[in-house]
Image: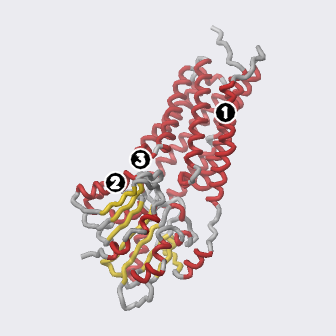
Amino acid sequence: MTIKPLSKEFYSFMIFFLSISCIMSVIQSTALVIIGSQMMGLQSFDTWMWLVLFVIAVTDGTLIRYLWHNDYRLAAVACLMSTSAVLTQHVLILNRELRVFYQEHYHVVASVLFATAVLCGLSLVFTKAGKKRWLRLGGTITVLVTLLLAITFVLYFQTGEGGTKLLIDKTSRWISLFGILPVVCFVIHFRLENKRLAVTDNAPAQTAPALIKLAAFLGLLFLGFNFSVEALRYSRPFKPSAADLRRSKAMEDYHFVDKSGDSLPYRLLNPLDYDSTQQYPLIVCLHHGGAHGKDNMQQLSADPAPFLMELPTRTKYPAFVFMPQCPKGLGFSGAYGNASVDSLVFRTMRELLGRLPIDRKRIYVLGISGGGYGSWHFASVHPELFAAAIPICGGGDPQYGPKLVNVPIWAFHGARDKMAPVSHSRDMIAAIRKAGGKPKYTEYEFAGHGIWDKVGNEDIMEWMFAQHKE
């Protein structure tokens, strides 16, 4: 039975969207290489991801139609499974409520993505579709790239050493760049198919495909430009402002280096009118994700640091303020198996406790966003150390609830937070209360992720300084 060929307009449509996919892959992979997972914090990320979702749906849908039409049924079904997994992942990331499920079941989602991608690639190699040279090559590259990414994924979560995790993460980012090669193979395939197709009529182009192509082009032009510019701006070296330089003069610049050679940059603010014969509280201030680096400067302008450095705060609440800076690619909490700098922070704290007149009954931790997750984590793994914790738009492991029963906690979160799901704070508070604890919790009903201005107006310092170990 002779299969009627698809129209030249179909091939033109397919080539156009595969080309758009190539460009988008280059943009996103480049952003991933230069800033990593931090790209999820870009303001343009959500709109960019909706465009990616749209292009994937159209491109893969058209490819599946081609495979089915040409009786490559097994390949069509396998590609449909892979596409469904990819689209599901994007929806989980973009939906605020579903993002919690995605974070908690990331390993399962990733496993499904890897398995379906390998299955799709194999179907283009070992079924009838493999008779087409460029489809077969595209399938082969898909399998190889996916297997390499799967290996780095497993290695990343199996190793506990931060430096090794960073190396594996960087390797994974570079491997992802090769994900564009299968798309290039498909472009070549469809161009050759289009050339073989004789022109049978001069029917005018249909309106719907033309409008879809126009929407994709305009989306790439504007949203792709915004996403690229923001990613490049984020990747530029930090340039301290006059306020940053002024703050830095008030604080000592330190680098803690342990026996293995790992180092942690940090700043230390002495109490106002410091008297070495007196003991003072220690405030551990953990910055958000936007201040990661090794310049030992950015954390000074990241909330809540400026608030703690203000003269009225220092006058009324004299204390040592310890501000570690988390290197890029690491976190304070190690949430969801990610690389963490927590052990290095604790070793630095031990060194501070050994040389400074710190009141060990009044050690406090507070932080926002990534620092909020860190605050939950620090208090959870060392509840005996902290007299109080103020985690802001963060989260932790509810299994630690019983250990936090006797740690005074005042947590904050915005109900409409798209970056850190509010359920993360709710779950921690619920776990502590279930275990018999009485943590304080303030949730701002109409607020999102940026809630520091609201938190700063609360009596957090008065409450915190009233807490002390027995």
Per the image, label 1 sits on a secondary structure element best described as helix
Q: Which residue is mark 2?
A: 426
Task: Please say if 46 is above or below 240.
Answer: above
In the rendered image, the quadrant that contains the C terminus is bottom left
Sequence-earlier tag: 3 or 1: 1
The answer to which quarter of the image holds residue 381 is: bottom left
Q: Is residue 129 visible?
A: yes
x then y, percent, for residue 396: 37, 57
Q: Residues within 10 Å of mark 3 (few under 14, many from 20)?
A: some
Q: Is residue 32 left or right of residue 424?
A: right
The kind of residue on which mark 2 rests is: Arg
Which circle marks residue 100 in the picture? Answer: 3
Per the image, label 3 sits on a secondary structure element best described as helix
Sequence-earlier tag: 3 or 2: 3
Per the image, label 2 sits on a secondary structure element best described as helix
x then y, percent, for residue 310: 48, 78
Which circle marks residue 17 in the picture? Answer: 1
Q: Is residue 169 visible?
A: no
Q: How many angstroms separate mark 1 from mark 2 (CA)?
A: 43 Å
Count of residue discs: 3
x then y, percent, for residue 280: 37, 83
Which circle marks residue 236 in the picture? Answer: none
Q: Is residue 363 left or right of residue 132?
A: left
Q: How many angstroms separate mark 3 from mark 1 (CA)?
A: 32 Å
